[in-house]
Amino acid sequence: TKVIITKEDGYISNVIIKDHSNYDEYGQDIVCAGISSIVIGGLNALERKGLNKDYILVDEKDNCIIINLINDEVIQTVIDTIIIQLITIEDEYGDYLKITFK
């Protein structure tokens, strides 16, 4: 799985998550399951706070999630938390998850 994080004027403006990790077969892939849980859980938290639908555009297509963000303190804190969690997966399973900052 590839994660591309774009920073703009000191805040995270875009996160792209694409491809499968291929750690294991479908339904057994703990890396993919971990990534999905972290990302979907974070976005669900923002939605519960009423921030997701008005300020975050999520485009899901072709094994790719594109998240466009605004510079809002709560949104940035949640996205930072998502990224830190993804980095911990990358630390352990770096052959299956690559994070790039632009």
Image (spheres, helix red, strand yellow):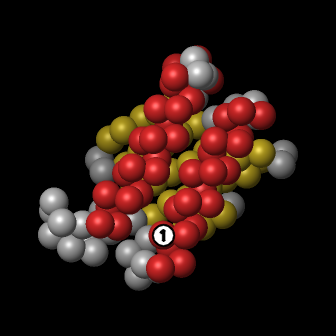
Q: Where on the picture, by quarter, is residue 60? A: top left
Q: Position of residue 50 (x, y in %)?
A: 57, 18
Q: Is residue 66 above or below residue 20?
A: above
Whether residue 19 is visible, yes or no, is no
Q: Where on the picture, by quarter, is residue 11? A: top right
State the quadrant of the C terminus: bottom right
Q: Is residue 33 above or below residue 24?
A: above
Q: Nearer the viewer, residue 9 or 37?
A: 37
Q: Position of residue 94 (x, y in %)?
A: 47, 80
Give the side of residue 99 with respect to residue 6, left or right: left
State the quadrant of the N terminus: bottom left
The residue that appears at 48% across and 69% down in the rendered structure is 89
Give the secondary structure at mark 1: helix
The residue that appears at 38% across and 59% down in the rendered structure is 34
The residue that appears at 50% across and 73% down in the rendered structure is 90
Q: Which residue is mark 1?
A: 89
Give the side of residue 50 with respect to residue 66, left or right: right
Q: Which residue type carries mark 1?
A: Ile
Q: Is residue 83 above or below residue 31?
A: above
The residue that appears at 57% across and 67% down in the rendered structure is 87
Q: Position of residue 15 (x, y in %)?
A: 56, 49
